[in-house]
């Protein structure tokens, strides 16, 4: 558990909404620990994408996500990363 807390210091979570027509483009620029989580939204044309990425990548990834079609991009801290 302690190692998970220490590891988390180097990671952040990103969440965004993506119109499904842009989903593959967004996923192509989005790194993840394994694979991003994609969830359907109440509007069937949209989905939510969640991922955990290294904090060094955030400032480069957010503009790429925006250009790829993501909106409502939220960055938030991670407390533990247990691999």
Image: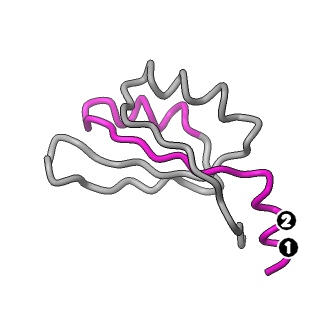
Image point 81% across, 62% down: which residue? 7
Residue 31 tag number: none
Gap in angstroms between the C-alphas marked 2 and 1: 5 Å
Give the quarter of the image for residue 66: top left
Please determine whether, in this image, residue 79 is positioned above or below residue 14. below
Question: x, y (%) of residue 10?
Answer: 79, 51
Task: Report the span colored magenta.
Answer: 1-30
**Residue that numbered label 1 is attached to:** 3
Question: x, y (%) of residue 41?
Answer: 22, 52
Question: x, y (%) of residue 27?
Answer: 47, 38
Is 42 left or right of 30, judged from the image as shown? left
Is 10 left or right of 64, judged from the image as shown? right
Is 14 left or right of 41, judged from the image as shown? right
Quadrant in which the C terminus appears: bottom right
Question: x, y (%) of residue 29?
Answer: 54, 31
Residue 6 tag number: 2
Mark 2 nearby-residue class (10 Å; few <14, some 14–19, many ≥20) = few
Image point 37% across, 36% down: which residue? 72
Instruction: Check if residue 29 falls in the magenta segment.
Output: yes
Mark 1 nearby-residue class (10 Å; few <14, some 14–19, many ≥20) = few
Image point 34% across, 49% down: which residue? 48
Q: Secondary structure at mark 2?
A: helix
Q: Are marks 2 and 1 in contact (CB under 8 Å)?
A: yes
Give the quarter of the image for residue 34: bottom right
Please determine whether, in this image, residue 23 is positioned above or below residue 36. above
Q: Residue furthest bottom?
A: 1
Please determine whether, in this image, residue 64 is positioned above or below residue 32. above
Quadrant in which the N terminus appears: bottom right
């Amino acid at each position: 558990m302690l190692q998970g807390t220490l590891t988390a210091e180097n990671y952040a979570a990103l969440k965004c909404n993506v119109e499904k027509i842009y989903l593959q483009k967004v996923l192509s620029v989005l790194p993840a620990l394994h694979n991003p989580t994609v969830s359907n939204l109440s509007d069937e044309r949209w989905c939510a994408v969640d991922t955990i990425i290294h904090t060094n990548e955030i400032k480069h990834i957010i503009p790429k996500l925006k250009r790829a079609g993501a909106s409502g991009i939220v960055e938030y801290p991670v407390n533990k990363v247990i691999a």
